[in-house]
Image (cartoon, rainbow, N blue to C red):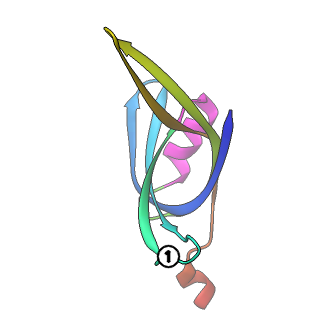
Amino acid sequence: MLSFSLTGSIGCILATASHEVTLAISAVLDREGEPLRVVWVVCVARESALRAKILVHFREGDLVRIEGKIKQRRRQVGALAFHSVGFVIHSIELRPSPSDDAS
């Protein structure tokens, strides 16, 4: 399974089901030779201790560092196969905001 790591701001936190919490994270995409742009990544926390930590300690607007696994999925609908990827969080930590560094 592939892994990912990103640093960005929490746009929203949704308790989408009893067994998962979904985070929308805005992050800056910096590709060599291309202008900077903001991207949104939707990540899911499924481990119960991690879900509880997110709901208690994190808020919209917090700058966080997330690490996890990229899970590939295949869904069959009749003769058609649909492929998608999901970002599953394994760890999250609060990062100091840029305004905290400036003071």
Q: Residue at x 33, y 10 (%)?
A: 79
Whether 8 is among the magenta residues is no
Q: Residue furthest left?
A: 78
Whether residue 27 is visible, yes or no, is yes
* Residue type, mark 1 in image: Glu
Q: Give residue 28's position: percent from left, percent from top.
A: 50, 69
Work out whether 84 lies above or below 91. above
Label 1 secondary element: loop
Q: Residue 96 appears in which quarter of the rendering?
A: bottom right
The prevailing secondary structure element of the residues shown in magenta is: helix
**Magenta span of residues:** 45-58
Residue ID at (40%, 36%): 15
Quadrant including the C terminus: bottom right
Give the residue number, with chain letter if any, for mark 1: 34
Does residue 103 appear anywhere in the picture? Answer: no
Q: Nearer the viewer, residue 29 or 55?
A: 29
- Whether 89 is drawn above or below 46: the answer is below
Position of the N terminus by quadrant: top right
Q: Residue at x 53, y 83 (%)?
A: 99
Question: What residue is rendered at 44% in x and 28% in y?
Answer: 83
76 or 90: nearer the eye?
76
Q: Is residue 47 magenta?
A: yes
Total numbered badges shown on the rendered structure: 1
- Using the image as rendered, state which of residue 42 and residue 16 is in the foreground: 42
